[in-house]
Amino acid sequence: MNGPVQMYKTRQIIKHDLKVDLPTCMYGMRNIHAKTNDLGPLGDHVSPFQDSADISKQVKQLLKRIEDLSEMDTLIDRQERILRQLNDLRQEMLNLKTNLCSTTVTNELVKNAVSTPTEVPKLLNIVINVSPQHPPYSLLLIKKLCVDLFNVNVSTHLHSTVSSLPEKTLTFEKQLQSFPVNANLPTYTIRLIWKTVVPSCELIVSQVPISGEPNVLRYLARLIPNVLIYETADNVWEIDSALDLSYSLIRARTKTERLGLIQSLNKKLGKSKFLCGHSEMTIADLAASSAIRQVADNEVTQNMMKWLQRCDE
Amino acid sequence: MVENNPLETPQKGDSKKASKKEAKKAKKTERKSQAEASVDEDVSVGKYGNFSLIQSNSQAPKREFHDVAKIDKALVGTNVWVRGRLHTARARGKQCFIVLRQQEFTIQALVNVCETVSKMMVKFSSNISKESIVDVEAMVSEVGGTGVAGCTQRYIELVVSQIWVVSVAASQLPLQIEDASRPEKQEDADSLNIRVNQDTRLDNRVLDLRTPANQAIFRIEAGVCRLFRDVLTKKGFVEIHTPKIIPAASEGGANVFTVSYFKGSAYLAQSPQLYKQMAIAADFGKVFTIGAVFRAEDSNTHRHLTEFTGLDLEMAFHYHYHEVMLTIGDMFNAIFKGLRDEFATEIDIVGNQFLVEPFTFLDPPLVLQYNDGRAMLAEAGVEIGPEDDLSTPAEKLLGRLVKAKYDTDFYILDKYPLAVRPFYTMPDPENKTLSNSYDMFMRGEEVTSGAQRIHDPELLTERAKHHGIELEKIAAYIDSFRYGCSPHAGGGIGLERVVMLYLGLDNIRKTSMFPRDPKLILVLKILV
């Protein structure tokens, strides 16, 4: 209220400097708000900051003491090195960003890749050739598994050597397209080409194709280990043998051959929820369920029927 | 002829030699007399010879003819009339083997001395010059075993009872059809290595076109044209015809031919684009045109002609030019499917002469972004700048890469850099360096170039200024958009190129019936 002279004067209502007579019936306490001689950086504030000022003073003192130690130097070096590396990484990411095509879709991809590097894998430009007799049902399950992380857009093409698609393949295509698309998540495109290939499907990466659906799944599992369980599982050898069984199942010529393989898969399932005693779905389940749906839909046991339904959920 | 006296007795007492001589003489005369005797009793008179000039006589015979292609085992034992070219004739003793050719189909005909066929007739048959047109009456008969090698109708032959020459070919041919249709196998030491080179072929195009491969090529070309029409008509397109004599050079870039036009001069159309766009502005919605296109470019490559047939289309769309791009892609696929299903025989025949892999494609067609293409090239070690055009070798390499990865010979490359496109190309709304334009490739070579066109006169003026084009020259073009125009896109396709690349041939001159290139016209002036 003691502003410039141009302001009017008001009558004082509260007097701060009144002398208070403290009662003597109570025991006395030290005044914690009382001013000390060192105010610190936050000196003209009251209460809690006073304490923090004290702490900072202590830390300063501590630092002063250890400043002379050699450990400190190495620590500083290390921090600087890390900062430099981070900077390099950042520069690299920026370069990548400018290199990648600048349409909005891919920009979004890059942004997402930057913000959640651990979750989003690099799934660009995957081409899978599939024989029309053997639709890869595992893709449907993969789509389901990925639904919270990213959209898998499967675009299908018909190769000129194939004149028309069988009924079950057309239904499979429809199922693929019927998935809802979450616009907030990044989208990856897998190109599926219907083409006569042996056995059943092959993935084109470089010159040599990866053939067989189980092997394609192995490849995908290495790309997105957080979605498809394979090598992180504790009994990889079991999964591998289940994968090989699925591979043979697709190629099996006679019914007896198929029944034998299904029998072995059934053994692997046992009483557990999923194949090889797992409680979570692994790529063994993806490959086996897909193989069974492709060639031996009606030749499975009751137990496996239930497992197939579990896989679809 | 005067008959010799065979009874003349030899003089006795001569040397052995003389007696031998006499014996020979006697034999000779005997044979001669026999021959004359057979002339007298030629059983085939009136069954062979040169047919009188066909002038559409009122007494002309009415005969039903059979196509060589349709003669098969079902006709064994029946009598047929066939008109065809004498492909080859080969006499062997009392027989003469003739191969008759009708377009790309061939059949063996046998002239065999028998009760009704005289030796004279066999001799006459073997002396007919190659490439003459003959009428043959014959009985169809079956051939066992592996059949007749080298004929399309393998398991049957014709046993001739009459043979008439309708039109005689000169006995000296500038090129042999057999040579011209010999398969082009690269390393084959055993087979004959006689070739007819391209110039000789083009100098004698009429003969060259008679080869089975050429017959098939131009049937396929007709097929492409028909399929283009059918597919687009079904999609609701209207066929239009655009003028080929134009008052001013329409777009910059390609050179134009100047022709004298009464007191002034005019130009030959290098693209029907302006007229297609005017048809869109006039509310035809979807239009296409098939017609000659002229390019005065002095480029002597395997894929350039100065006059070619353009298949052009233009289409109004609602919100996105991909509507048009995918329509063109679908149209290509429909043409490829039509060729695959309807022209399998023709494609095989071409494949017999020019060994090429069959054409592959994907349905729906593969669409790649220009930048994806650049990335694929960069991976293979060829760097293309973000605003550079693809060079021809880069295009071919990209074609091979795409083929290796997707196993398709046809693909669409979308979103070309704005800088490499003509001024009327619509820029991309989200990235200033790109444009709404696309190229389509077959076997790694460009067959179509297209884009969304700017339909807004202000933007068009601005883009033209940016490209340094004089506004007066294109005032008419810009003005055609002043009264409102639907957004539209389109493209042009070179017919000869599509056929060449579909069949995997190495030269565009093979798919143009009478090709026009900067050099060839001088030669062809004499012929056509």
Image (cartoon, coloured by chain):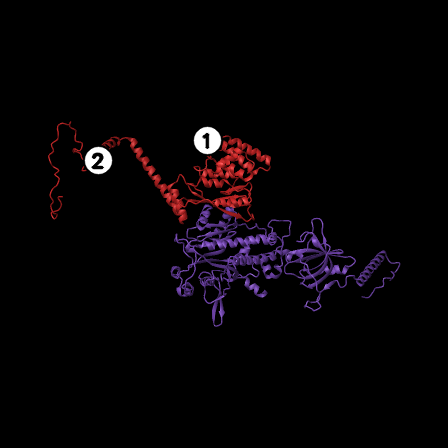
Residue sitting at x 30%, y 35%: A76
Image spot of residue A157 (x, y percent) = 51, 47
Viewer-nearest residue: B260 or A258? A258
Chain identifier, red in the render: A
Hey, which residue is sitting farthest right in the picture?
B12
**For numbered disc 1, what is the local secondary structure?**
loop
Q: Nearer the viewer, residue A302 or B205?
A: A302
Question: Residue A43 placed where, x, y %?
Answer: 19, 36
Which SS class for mark 2? helix
Q: Is residue A144 visible?
A: yes
Q: Residues within 10 Å of mark 2 (few under 14, many from 20)?
A: some
Q: Is residue A184 above or below residue B204?
A: above
- Along the viewing direction, whichever of B150 and B93 lies nearer the viewer: B150
Chain label for disc 2 = A
Q: Earlier in the sequence, mark 2 or mark 1?
A: 2
Asked if one can make out residue A208 in the rendered structure from this viewpoint, the answer is no
Above or below, B372 relative to B202: above
Q: Which chain is purple?
A: B
What distance separates the C-alpha of mark 2 from that of mark 1? 53 Å
Tell me: A171 left or right of A45.
right
Residue A5, position as x, y percentages in the image: 11, 47
For label 2, the residue is A49
Same chain for mark 2 and mark 1? The answer is: yes
- Above or below — where is B108 with respect to A49? below
Identify the residue shown where x is 59% and y is 36%.
Answer: A255
- Which residue is disc 1 drawn over? A234
What chain does mark 1 sit on?
A
Tag count: 2
Camera-side residue of A208 and A241: A241
Residue type, mark 2 in image: Phe
Q: Is residue A206 left or right of residue A94?
A: right
Position in image of residue B444 (x %, y %): 51, 51
